[in-house]
């Protein structure tokens, strides 16, 4: 599961790479439904999309999604760049809200990852939309070009992850591959984007991408997505097999920390990891080692964000 979330109050000067606009309210449409898991934490807002029945009568409706005030039954305006109707094949719409329900991230997904990403910020009866996905695409494409002999015209098939905070800052991570079906691993290239978008200034505070090898790519994916649910849903033939599985996850999460932390910060983590390994290896049983690795994975994963 990815972490995902994006709003405005006063006039501002736009960066050339950031597009933002105010969207106004309209009449409530017929045959529209609230997108599943799109509601704000307070239940006030949600994303309306055309039902499949409505789309079958008018296929252009997939391009018209709305942010709506669900409690007042009012549309707050159309979402620019929308491309989704309920139940659409090979496409997705992911929405993640801030805890105070004042802004959210809206991501439209294609077959292999994000197509567009925007921040929607609630303002009275309407909202302001700020596009942020183009910067991610640009940086990933540049990183892939450094590894590829042929010029890469796009950022590959990217999967994005977000961490919503209360400080109006949005950390964004994205991993990309030029071969999502893994048909030609020899010639496949990978990249990682690491940035933080500031909603107040409408600027990227940091935005960098780097090429990865396959093992680094797998490590970052695990570091960003691993959850205790995955462990609970996995069966093991023996405690030793569980320990092997946890050790593999631990190495992958550790790789993500190495790639995402500044060198000085990682140096401290590396020293700590060496000491932790000594304690783990001195554990009296496999069960104790497993508990130790579970706790260490969780601690390391927190450092990724």
Image (cartoon, grey):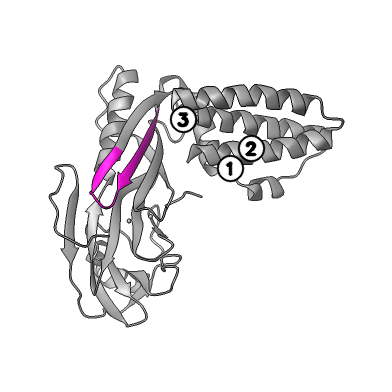
Q: Are marks 3 and 1 in contact (CB under 8 Å)?
A: no
SS type, badge 2: helix
Q: Are marks 1 and 2 in contact (CB under 8 Å)?
A: yes
At 82% from the left and 37% from the top, the residue drawn is 287
User: Considering only vertical position in the picture, is 274 above or below 156?
Assistant: above
**Could you tell which of marks 3 and 1 lies nearer the N-terminus?**
1
From the viewer's perspective, is 182 left or right of 288?
left
Q: Quadrant of residue 197?
A: top left
User: Considering only vertical position in the picture, is 273 above or below 118?
Assistant: above
**Could you tell which of marks 1 and 2 lies nearer the N-terminus?**
1
Residue annotated with mark 1: 226
- How far across and down, in percent of the image, does residue 254 sit? 57, 29
| Alpha carbon distance from label 3 to label 2 | 16 Å
- How far across and down, in percent of the image, does residue 171 sit? 39, 44
- Say if the magenta span includes residue 55: no
Q: Residues within 10 Å of mark 2 (few under 14, many from 20)?
A: many
SS type, badge 3: loop
Span colored in magenta:
191-205
- Say if the magenta span includes residue 201: yes
SS type, badge 1: loop
Q: Which mark is residue 14?
A: none
From the viewer's perspective, is 167 left or right of 151?
right
| Alpha carbon distance from label 3 to label 1 | 18 Å
Residue annotated with mark 2: 297
Q: Residues within 10 Å of mark 1 (few under 14, many from 20)?
A: some
User: Considering only vertical position in the picture, is 101 above or below 110?
Assistant: below
Residue 242 visible at all: no
């Amino acid at each position: 599961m990815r972490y995902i979330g994006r709003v405005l109050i006063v006039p501002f000067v736009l960066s050339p790479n950031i597009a933002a606009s105010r969207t106004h309210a309209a009449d409530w449409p017929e045959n529209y439904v609230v997108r599943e898991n799109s509601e704000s934490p307070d239940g006030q807002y949600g994303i309306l999309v055309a039902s499949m029945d409505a789309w079958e009568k008018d296929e252009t409706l997939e391009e018209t999604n709305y942010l709506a005030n669900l409690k007042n039954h009012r549309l707050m305006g159309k979402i620019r760049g929308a491309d989704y109707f309920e139940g659409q094949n090979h496409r997705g719409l992911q929405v993640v809200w801030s805890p105070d329900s004042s802004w959210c991230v809206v991501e439209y997904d294609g077959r292999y990852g994000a197509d567009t990403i925007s921040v929607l910020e609630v303002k009275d009866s309407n909202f302001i939309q700020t596009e942020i996905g183009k910067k991610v695409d640009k940086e990933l494409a540049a990183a892939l070009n450094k590894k590829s002999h042929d010029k890469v015209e796009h950022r590959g098939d990217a999967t994005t992850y977000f961490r919503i905070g209360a400080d109006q800052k949005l950390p964004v991570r994205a991993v990309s591959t030029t071969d999502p079906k893994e048909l030609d691993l020899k010639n496949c290239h990978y990249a990682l984007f690491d940035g933080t978008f500031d909603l107040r200034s409408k600027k990227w505070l940091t935005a960098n991408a780097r090429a990865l090898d396959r093992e680094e790519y797998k490590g970052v994916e695990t570091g960003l997505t691993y959850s205790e649910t995955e462990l609970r849903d996995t069966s093991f033939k023996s405690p030793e097999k569980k320990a092997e599985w946890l050790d593999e996850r631990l190495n992958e999460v550790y790789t993500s920390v190495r790639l995402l932390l500044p060198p000085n910060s990682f140096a401290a983590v590396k020293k700590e990891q060496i000491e932790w390994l000594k304690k783990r290896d001195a554990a009296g049983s496999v069960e104790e080692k497993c508990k130790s690795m579970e706790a260490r994975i969780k601690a390391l994963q927190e450092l990724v964000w």
